[in-house]
Image: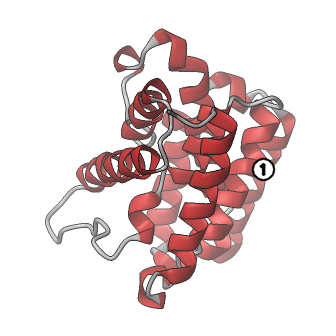
Amino acid sequence: MHISDKEAWIKAREQIFKRIREAPPKLFVNDNLELHIEKVHKWGYLLEPNPSYRLKIAWDIHDIDRADEGRVERGADESFEDYKQRHQERSARLGKELLTCIEARPQLIEDVFHMVSYHDHGNLETVDPELRRDYLALKDADGAAFLDSFDEYILKWSLAHARKRGHKTWEERLTDRAKSLQDIKDLWETFQRKLHDSS
């Protein structure tokens, strides 16, 4: 017997925050995952005021890899894209394990697995058309949350890297729909101003 999607969201959310609280502090040096999840929800609700439970679960667990001691770290000679590919694949696997453990519906598990597998880098042709709107809302909310986290990420990376990631997020990651929203336009202007002020 599988639990309802609403119950799955409640349990998955409890589990991810439990993992964050119980994880060794060394995992979160300049990396406030709890705050990131809340920002993803903030921007996600702007994009999708009535999100499905599968989308809310994906918002919560898309970075579950970062709350685990075996988290993916970037190799010395590894491209940023390859590192993020490994991160999203591991997050998808860990999320699938979590949802299976709490007895979510098999189709919900597969949908969330598919969305999280491509949340950083993905080709829309690889995404089931039925999932596309939720998938884009996950990518857009995660991208907006990055732009909304300049003060945290500037501690983690160089100014040049933050600039490169910010421009890549705006130009390649966010959809035209997201970029048309005034709040996200304002967010981008604030990000650019902070880059300029930090130079």
Visible residue check, residue 192: no
Residue in view at x 44 percent, y 64 percent: 161
Residue type at mark 1: give it: Lys
Can you tell which quarter of the image residue 64 is in?
Answer: bottom left
Q: Residue furthest top?
A: 129
Q: How is the image coloured?
A: secondary structure
Location of the C terminus (image quadrant) = bottom right
Residue 48 horizontal side relative to residue 150, left or right: right
- Residue 69, given in percent of the width and then of the height, sits at 33, 76
Residue for badge 1: 42
Between residues 86 and 190, which one lies in front from this camera angle? 86
Residue in view at x 55 percent, y 62 percent: 15
Can you tell which quarter of the image residue 73 is in?
Answer: bottom left
Above or below, 152 relative to 133: below
Residue 159 horizontal side relative to residue 40, left or right: left
Category of crowding for the residue at label 1, using alpha-carbon neighbours closer than 10 angstroms: few (below 14), some (14–19), many (at least 20): some
Q: Residue furthest left?
A: 77
- Residue 197, given in percent of the width and then of the height, sits at 71, 72
Above or below, 131 relative to 55: above
Visible residue check, residue 70: yes
- Residue 139, given in percent of the width and then of the height, sits at 55, 37
Between residues 12 and 39, which one lies in front from this camera angle? 12
Q: How many marks?
A: 1
Residue in view at x 47 percent, y 42 percent: 103
Q: Residue furthest bottom?
A: 25
Residue 97 horizontal side relative to residue 145, left or right: left
